[in-house]
Amino acid sequence: MVEEHLGGCLCGRVRFKAVGRPQRVGVCHCMDCRRHHGAMFYAAAIFDAHSVTIAGPTHAYKGRCFCPNCGSSVFAFIGEEIELHLGALDQPEKFRPTYECWVARRASWVPRFSDTVTYAKDCDAN
């Protein structure tokens, strides 16, 4: 049986379904993610774009997609991949991050996540 992962925005107009397991699950502390999410860090499950179906209207800013009705940030496109925001999942505890990027910008009061590989900057730029 193939795993399905469901989620969506605050008002429910945008919904998504991901099939299978994510390629990776991570946490980012970069300034772009902080500002986009209005939070000190951001967590996402990254899937191949072809394994995710989106229903409902969305708007985007530089690949970061959100609901035009409630403003919820739901997912982002990066090349052939799609980042599903863990907080937008119906079952956000289903995935556990295995890495953290941009730890050089981690706030001093945010503890390190246990059992994660850390990268000072981008995962591929260290």
Image (cartoon, helix red, strand yellow):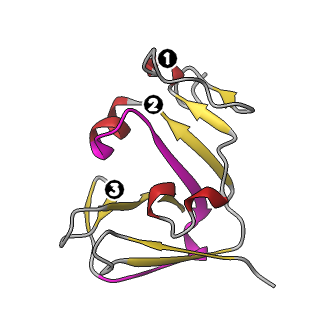
Q: Looking at the rendered structure, which numbered label has been put on residue 104? A: 1
What kind of residue is marked 2?
His
Q: Quadrant of residue 68?
A: bottom left
| Mark 1 vs 3, N-terminal side | 3
Q: Position of residue 63 (x, y in %)?
A: 34, 57
What kind of residue is marked 1?
Ala
Characterize the local packing of mark 2: few (<14), some (14-19) or many (20 or more) Cα atoms within 10 angstroms: many
Q: Which residues are magenta?
A: 36-56
In this view, the residue in front, 112 or 102, is: 112
Labelled pair 2, 1 in contact (Cβ < 8 Å): yes
- Direction from residue 117 to residue 18 in the image, left or right: left
- The verdict on residue 34 being magenta is no
Circle 3 SS class:
strand
Q: Position of residue 24 (x, y in %)?
A: 67, 51
- Residue at mark 2: 29
Image point (63%, 49%), residue name: 25
Per the model, the C-alpha gap separating discs 1 and 3 is 23 Å
Q: Position of residue 6 (x, y in %)?
A: 54, 76
- Direction from residue 54 to residue 101 in the image, left or right: right
Q: Quadrant of residue 61?
A: bottom left
Q: Looking at the rendered structure, which numbered label has been put on residue 64? A: 3
